[in-house]
Image (cartoon, grey):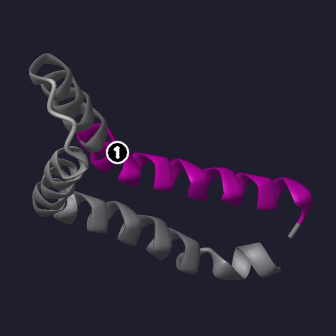
Amino acid sequence: MDQGMVIDLAQEALWTIIIVAGPMLALALVVGLIVSIFQTVTSIQEPTLAFVPKILAVFVGVLVFGPWMLRTLMEFIIQLYTNFNYYIG
């Protein structure tokens, strides 16, 4: 296993992590922005008002995107284990 192969594997792993985590991070970002605008307009400065909707949005996102996230991670892991002999030899 040479240095280029390790870099390729690390790059593919990081890309998979970004792809899988992206929808949850985007949901938290959008909900946080909406709640912040709401808090600014109404002058409500309650910290839990910013926290709870983001948690709920991420939970709903996991329910919606969970099967896709699991499938994406499983494809990466299966590809990694299938080519294991190639990586060590």
Categorize mark 1 by other alpha carbons within 10 Å: few (<14), some (14-19), many (20+). some
Pinpoint residue 14: horizontal percent, then vertical percent. 59, 53
Q: Residue at (79%, 80%) from the top-left corner?
A: 88
Indicate the position of residue 28 as horizontal and vertical percent values.
Answer: 27, 43
Please state the horizontal and vertical placement of residue 80, each as a whole percent of the image: 57, 72
Q: Quadrant of residue 52?
A: bottom left
Which amino acid type is shown beneath numbered disc 1? Answer: Leu
- Please tell me which residue is depicted at 25% across the width and 48% down the height of the picture: 47
Q: Is residue 8 found left or right of 15 in the rendered image?
A: right
Q: Is residue 3 magenta?
A: yes
Farthest-out residue, top = 41
Q: Residue at x 39, y 66 (%)?
A: 73
Of helix, strand and loop, which mostly describes the magenta segment?
helix
Quadrant placement of the N terminus: bottom right
- Label 1: element kind: helix
Q: How many marks?
A: 1
The residue closer to the viewer here, 79 or 64, is 64
Where residue 86 sits: x, y (%)? Answer: 72, 74
Span shown in magenta: 2-27
Classify residue 3 as left or right of residue 42: right
Asked whether 41 or 79 is in front, the reply is: 41
The residue at which mark 1 appears reads as 25
Tell whether position 34 is magenta. Answer: no
Relative placement, left or right, of 81 versus 56 is right
Against 16, is 66 above or below?
below
Q: On the rendered image, what quadrant is the C terminus found in?
A: bottom right
Q: Residue furthest right?
A: 2
Say which of 16 and 34 sits in front.
34
Q: Nearer the viewer, residue 34 or 16?
A: 34
